[in-house]
Image (spheres, grey):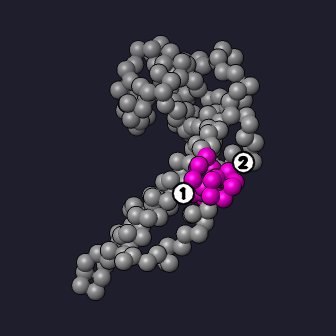
Amino acid sequence: MNIILTAKQAKQAREDTSLSQGKVATELQLNRTYLSLFESGKYVFDDNTLQSLRSYYEALGVVINNETMEVTDTEARLRDGFIIPHAIDDDEVEEFLAEYAENKSVITTLCADKPETGLFGGVVQEDVESRQYEIILLMARNFLLIEELQGHLTLMPSQAEENEQSENMAEYVRNLFSGFNRNSISVE
């Protein structure tokens, strides 16, 4: 298991260098609250941020020893900020992470792009509503990808009763999203 930096190691490294969380957060352009939550074990940074944090402390002379990490390889593994149970195979993890990253990118683009304007310069309401719908679907899908990555599958009782099959929320949203075509939305 490739662990870059644990919360305990980060906190110890910061204390060893007599730096405040604010100073470290400012230097690395991190949110200080996230750094605090990370050090207390309540938040997980992505691999790039963990590597930056580790490199920062090592550049200050802190020796971070991977052999002293108290992480068990039998229960879960860390990947891009997600704590993933070993029950999920690596190919499935890669597929989930790729879809998650793509969805995040599309959400960012949809939020950044200006909506269409009409003939008289006003915003086309149908475009705004279409974007909102797509963003909500992508966010819902990403939430469920996170749940799947963490080994949590939530069954939807109404769907299971109606179809006499167990469909989980992730499958429901995936099916809903797969039928989504932005150009086919009709707004009344």
The quadrant in which residue 74 appears is top right
**Separation of disc 1 and disc 2 at Cα?**
16 Å
Q: Residue at x 47, y 13 (%)?
A: 16
Task: Provide the secondary structure element on which disc 1 rests.
Answer: helix
**Kind of residue indicated by mark 2:** Glu
Within 10 angstroms of label 2, few (less than 14), some, or many (20 or more) residues? few
Please state which of residues 48 and 110 is positioned toward the viewer in this rendering: 110
Q: Residue at x 49, y 73 (%)?
A: 182
- Tell me whether the residue at label 1 lies in contact with that at label 2, contact meaning CB atoms closer than 8 angstroms: no
| Image coords of residue 21 (percent x, y) | 39, 24
Magenta stretch bounds: 155-174
Disc 1: which residue = 103
Instruction: Let me know if residue 160 is in the magenta part.
Output: yes
Please state which of residues 153 and 40 is positioned toward the viewer in this rendering: 153
The circle on residue 92 is 2
**Kind of residue indicated by mark 1:** Asn
| Image coords of residue 36 (percent x, y) | 41, 25
| Image coords of residue 141 (percent x, y) | 55, 54
Type of secondary structure dominating the magenta stretch: helix
Instruction: Let me know if residue 30 is in the magenta part.
Output: no
